[in-house]
Image (tube, helix red, strand yellow):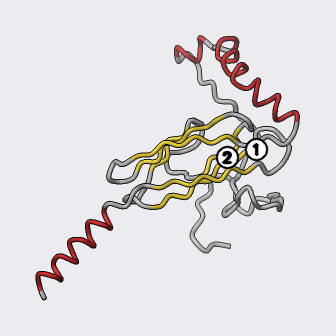
Amino acid sequence: MKPYLFFFLILFSVSMVSQDLEVKGKTINPSDNINDGVIQLEVDGGVPPYTYKWSNQLTPLSSKTASGLVEGVPYSVTVTDNAGTSITNEYTIETQSITEIFNGNMSPAVSALGSVLFWDPFEATGIYDPVVYADVKLIATPGWSASVEDRFVLKQWLVEEGEHVEKGQE
C-alpha cells in the first residue's frame, strides 16, 4: 500500500508543478473618447507571483491591468511567473469612433516626431530639473476599474499636505 501512496503523491506533486502558464486578456473601451482603453489580464497556472512587462512603458511590472491606452494600437505583454516561465500575448483595443481611428493611426507617427522635435538638450545633459509643478493632483480612487461608470470628485482635503496620517484617523 505504501508504494502506491508514494507513487500517487509523486504523480500529484509533478502534475501540480507542471501546470502551464495561461493568460487570458480582456480589452475594454469604456467610451468613444481617445486614449482611455484598458487591458485586464487573468493568469492561471505557473508559480505565483507574476510579473507583467507591458509595451506601454507607463504600466508597472506588478500591474495586471494597463489603462490609458490608445485604441487601435497593438500592445504586447510578457507575463513571467516565479519559476521563470513566460508567455507573450498581443492585444488591440477596438475603436468605437472616427476620432479613435484617426488617433490610433497617427499616434505612432506623432510619438516619433515628438521625440525629434521636442528633444531638450538641457534635460538630456542634466543641466536643469524638467519637473513641472502643478496645483492639481491626480489621486487614484481605490477599487476603481474601467467598468465603473460612477465619477468621483475630491471636494476637500481632510489633512494638510505632507502631514502624517495614522491608520483609522478621522
What amino acid type should be assigned to the residue bearing mark 1?
Asp
In terms of depth relative to the viewer, which is nearer, 127 or 89?
A: 89
From this view, report whether residue 108 is shown above or below residue 138: above
Residue located 67% across and 52% down the image:
161
- Check the image and report above or below for 150 versus 33: below
Residue 110, image quadrant: top right
In primary-sequence order, the first of circles 1 and 2 is 1
Q: Position of residue 134 (x, y in %)?
A: 74, 37
Give the amino acid type for the residue marked by disc 2 in the picture.
Ser
**Of 32 and 167, which appears nearest the observer?**
32
Query: What is the number of the mark on residue 36?
Result: 1
169 over 89 or under it: above or below: below
Note whether residue 167 is visible: yes
Task: Give the residue at x 70% y 60%.
Answer: 144
User: Tag 1's secondary structure?
Assistant: loop
User: Dot 2 corresponds to which residue?
Assistant: 67
Query: What's the CA distance linking mark 1 and mark 2?
Result: 7 Å
Element type at mark 2:
strand
Residue contact at pointers 1 and 2, CB within 8 angstroms: yes
Quadrant the N terminus occupies: bottom left
- The local crowd at label 1, few if under 14, some if 14 to 19, many if 20 or more residues have their Cα within 10 Å, is some
Q: Position of residue 27 (x, y in %)?
A: 68, 50
One can see residue 155 in this view: no
Occupied quadrant, residue 156:
bottom right
